[in-house]
Image: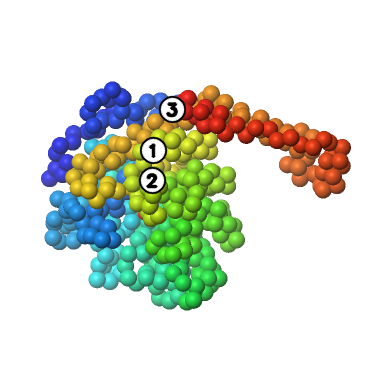
């Protein structure tokens, strides 16, 4: 069955096209700095929102029922959903997708049955991937929806639940490996607390580190050569999520000597929930050499929760692509649209419009960021701002050869330092001149 008969194949038509089902900026094979646009951007569709989303919110049930969701047998439904998924990916022209184990296959009556369900669906997915050339950017385990995980997964006070999470991640990692996934993601869905009155914070931190170390050990055993990623988020569903933001996660990884095993998956909406910009979170990760992948979406400035909207803000995309390009671009990572159409966008076509808008936004982000980098005015401004550290006392500081006595001698001999302009407004206008 064809699920999206109105759409043939979304193709690049350029910015003057009036056809809404085309790309105005995303031109997948266009060479940018010797690399195809699609290989810079590595777009992925998030299975959970796009195929499984029903348009529900805290105040109301789903507002649409996709045709593939009408099949009554759960396993048949899962298979049909995969067919719809690959039709969507192919027509949209993305190279990657991402899933949780429970998005692609239903949970069974017990753990073995859940594993059997997943194994069956993975075989179907393997075939669809082979036929279409579409690849898996990352897989993950949903260790947060089932009520067994109410008090956490890898931080649960009950070791039986901790074990369940381990076994589930083991199987999800195997499925990811089987499908050639390039990364495996840990988003700490319920790793956090609601109240410290019932929480042994130190023990839960220790448990979480053990959980991640066991994942590293099993990755080795399995021979999975993808990247392990942690996705920071400060709150929701728990009041305080342990993987609060990039800096917190990096500190945690260093404390437990896991820093060489994990990179970060930065999500825009999670950044703003933490009181940071998307650009800040990417920069903190990149500075630690830990920028792995991106969940590209956006929140709403006026709302304090994870609205997971399709990203359409050109500035955000420019700033993000600047950081990503300056960090050398993606290796195993990519831009996964962890985004959903609004509850009122009830139509299957809205799935296309959302992705097209987001893909064009990031294509523009890339094109503009590359121009900014090629002109090197911004880079030069920053280099000049810190030029004092290239010689004399500044260079000694960086070489670890300076001390407080030398500083005192210098300050005593020098005149009072005068601040140079940071030129913020000039720089903001410089960015505008590229847009
Ligand atoms: C939740 C979120 C997840 C992760 C994968 O806020 O972003 O969908 O990306 O578990
Ligand atoms: Co996400």
Q: Residue at x 21, y 57 (%)?
A: 62
Q: Residue at x 46, y 26 (%)?
A: 434
- Of the numbered discs 2 and 1, the one sitting upstream in the chain is 2
Q: From the top left corner, tell me how far across and down residue 124 is, in percent.
A: 24, 51
Q: Neighbour class for label 1 at 10 Å: few (<14), some, many (≥20)?
A: some
Q: Secondary structure at mark 2?
A: loop
| Rendered image quadrant of residue 384 | top right
Q: Which mark is residue 335?
A: none
* CA separation in Å, label 1 and label 3: 12 Å
Confirm or deny contact between disc 2 and disc 1 (CB under 8 A): yes
| Rendered-image quadrant of the C terminus | top left
Residue 229 in sight here: no
The residue tagged 3 is 435
The residue tagged 1 is 313
Q: From the top left corner, tell me how far across and down residue 91 is, in percent.
A: 23, 37
- Of the numbered discs 1 and 3, the one sitting upstream in the chain is 1
Q: Nearer the viewer, residue 122 or 96?
A: 96
* CA separation in Å, label 2 and label 1: 8 Å
| Rendered image quadrant of residue 148 | bottom left
State which image quarter holds ligand 1: bottom left
The residue tagged 2 is 298
Q: Residue at x 35, y 38 (%)?
A: 312
Q: Secondary structure at mark 3?
A: loop
């Amino acid at each position: 069955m064809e699920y999206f008969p109105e759409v043939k194949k979304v193709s690049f038509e350029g910015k003057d096209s009036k056809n809404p089902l085309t790309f105005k900026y995303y031109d997948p094979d266009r060479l940018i700095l010797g690399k195809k646009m699609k290989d810079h951007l590595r777009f992925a569709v998030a299975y959970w929102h796009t195929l499984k989303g029903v348009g529900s919110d805290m105040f109301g049930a789903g507002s649409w029922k996709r045709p593939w969701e009408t099949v009554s047998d759960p396993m048949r439904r899962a298979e049909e959903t995969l067919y719809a998924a690959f039709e969507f990916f192919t027509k949209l022209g993305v190279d990657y997708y991402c899933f949780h184990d429970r998005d692609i296959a239903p949970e069974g009556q017990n753990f073995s049955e859940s594993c059997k369900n997943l194994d069956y669906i993975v075989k179907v997915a393997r075939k669809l991937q082979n036929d279409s050339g579409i690849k898996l950017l990352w897989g993950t385990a949903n260790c947060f929806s089932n009520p067994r995980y109410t008090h956490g997964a890898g931080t649960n006070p009950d070791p039986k639940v901790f074990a369940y999470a381990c076994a589930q991640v083991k199987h999800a990692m195997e499925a990811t490996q089987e499908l050639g996934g390039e990364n495996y993601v840990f988003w700490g869905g319920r790793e956090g607390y609601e109240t410290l009155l019932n929480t042994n914070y130190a023990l839960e931190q220790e448990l979480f580190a053990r959980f991640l170390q066991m994942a590293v050990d099993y990755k080795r055993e399995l021979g999975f050569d993808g990247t392990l990623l942690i996705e920071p988020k400060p709150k929701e569903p728990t009041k305080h999520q342990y993987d609060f933001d990039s800096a917190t996660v990096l500190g945690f990884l260093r404390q437990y000597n896991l820093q060489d095993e994990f990179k970060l998956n930065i999500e825009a909406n999670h950044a703003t929930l933490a009181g940071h910009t998307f650009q800040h979170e990417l920069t903190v990760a990149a500075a630690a050499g830990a920028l792995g992948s991106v969940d590209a979406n956006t929140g709403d400035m006026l709302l304090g929760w994870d609205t997971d909207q399709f990203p359409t803000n050109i500035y955000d995309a420019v700033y993000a692509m600047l950081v990503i390009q300056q960090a050398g671009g993606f290796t195993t990572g990519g831009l996964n649209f962890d985004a959903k159409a609004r509850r009122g966008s009830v139509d299957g076509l809205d799935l296309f419009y959302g992705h097209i808008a987001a893909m064009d936004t990031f294509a523009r982000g890339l094109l503009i960021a590359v121009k900014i980098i090629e002109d090197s005015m911004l880079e030069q401004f920053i280099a000049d701002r810190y030029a004092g550290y290239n010689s004399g006392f500044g260079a000694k500081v960086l070489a670890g050869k300076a001390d407080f006595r030398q500083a005192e001698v210098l300050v005593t001999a020098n005149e009072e330092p005068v601040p140079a302009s940071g030129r913020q407004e000039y720089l903001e206008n410089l960015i505008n001149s590229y847009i």
